Amino acid sequence: MLTVLIRAFRVPDLRRKMLFTLAMIVLFRCGQILPAPGVNVVAVRECLSGTRGGLVDMLQLFSGGAMLKLSVFALGVMPYITAGIVVQLLTVMIPRLETLRKEGQQGQAKITQYTRYLTVALAVLNATTVVSLARTGRIFPNCNRQVLHGQDPLTVVVIVATMVAGTCVIMWLGELITDRGIGNGMSILVFTQVVAVFPSYVSNIFVLSPFALVVMLAAGVFLVAAVVFMEQAQRRIPVQYAKRMVGRRMYGGTSTYLPLKVNQAGIVPVIFTSSLLFLPQLATGLMGGTGPVAEWISRYLVSGDHPVYVTAYLLLIVAFTYFYVSITVNPVEVADNMKRFGGFVPGIRPGRPTAEYLRHVLSRLTAPGAAYLGTLSLIPIIAFVILRDPGTQQNFPFGGTTILIMVGVGLDTVKQIESQLEQRTYRGFLKGSSARP
């Protein structure tokens, strides 16, 4: 990876893109540090230093530490990612969106516009919830300090409007990185959020137990290698294209393959499951946390090591993995496209038999992919059981979500840099050969 980055930095065009991406990341982090107007920075800092676990750690991870600081970019990229996932799910269920998806670039631009509108709506909802928790003191359960300077409606409206505007700016930064920088803009910003809180988690583990930190770092190296192996694993289905005459030219007759990844769903099932299990805890916090329902939720769905929580976590990850793969990969559409261009799988008839074969292979691949996601997500709980330290689970830096985001975005960015380097190599080769007499 380091060699690829050095080679890319020597190319002027890629160097400008990499420096532009770094500048956008710096601007993004500045917005996450800058507090919103009306926030008591001293009180927030004191509450953050003395509060750990549960809601606090969840918000810290998914916002890069910005949400609990009530900063301008407090909501981070999660409203946009959630809106993108929802629109992707609705595309399968709503014929109008399905038609737009098939219209090419113009239809995709329309879907992107719908995603932006939904992002703003989710940002308003998220910002209102966070400010309400901060106003009532429930965002820091063990801290009695008042984190807002004022409790009047005007102050609340100003903070909510600031956070929503910050989410719109984040969307713009992500699109700028995608157009003028390296890699997918939103993925880079998600990577930045996760990496931003990683050093604090490591330092917390060191304070609890230096031996535990050494063990976790050694296990982290093994986990990163295992995640890289699984993220690169794929089933290559051979595809043969028949020869056909178009005018006076012969086309086809080539052999290729259709790659199907083992982890076809990526990190989406883990995000779905974490958000779904987080909603009951958030609802009970908003309602005051009293009553039999709140007690049941706090007993079974808050503590990560409880058997009910572990079972629900695993089952939801498996269910969401199968569901997401089924709506994102359409074997019938893939088989029809292959048939349209004269392609077929050797030994399988084109059309419906090919679609059934692809569906069978995809189902067989999704099973180990779901097991892989479930096992990776339970690593903090396993570390807690082995080390017998409650603080370890709350601050464990090598959780499934963290590792998947760091490795997945890193691999995707390096692949894009390598592809752009190869394009420039081929272009220089062709230019040199055409210059010869």
Image (cartoon, rainbow, N blue to C red):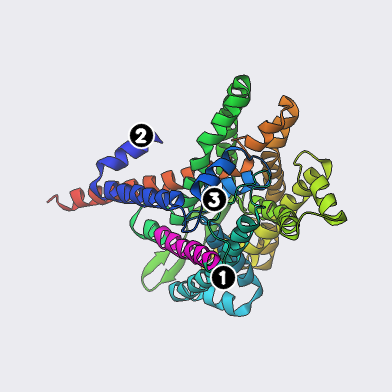
Category of crowding for the residue at label 2, using alpha-carbon neighbours closer than 10 angstroms: few (below 14), some (14–19), many (at least 20): few
Image position, residue 13 (x, y; %): 26, 50
Q: Comparing marks 2 and 3, which lies closer to the viewer?
A: 3
**Kind of residue indicated by mark 1:** Ala
Q: Mark 1 points at which residue?
A: 121
Residue at screen point 70% across, 62% down:
356
Which of the two residues, 68 or 180, is positioned nearer the viewer here? 68
Which residue ends up furthest to the top in the rendered image?
Answer: 211
Mark 1: secondary structure: helix
Which of the two residues, 138 or 80, is positioned nearer the viewer here? 138
Cα separation between marks 2 and 3? 31 Å
Quarter location, residue 324: bottom right
Is residue 157 in the magenta section?
Answer: yes
Q: Which of marks 3 and 1 is nearer the N terminus?
A: 3
Q: Name the residue under label 2.
A: 3
Q: Main secondary structure of the magenta part?
A: helix
Q: Comparing marks 1 and 2, which lies closer to the viewer?
A: 1
Mark 2: secondary structure: helix
Which range of residues does the magenta coloring cover?
Answer: 155-174
Q: Are marks 2 and 3 in contact (CB under 8 Å)?
A: no
Q: Are marks 1 and 2 in contact (CB under 8 Å)?
A: no
Cα separation between marks 3 and 1? 18 Å
Image position, residue 126 (x, y; %): 59, 62
**Kind of residue indicated by mark 3:** Ser
Q: Mark 3 points at which residue?
A: 63
Horizontal arrangement in the rendering, residue 108 relative to residue 151 (left or right): left
Q: Which of marks 2 and 3 is nearer the N terminus?
A: 2
Residue 346 makes an appearance in the image = no
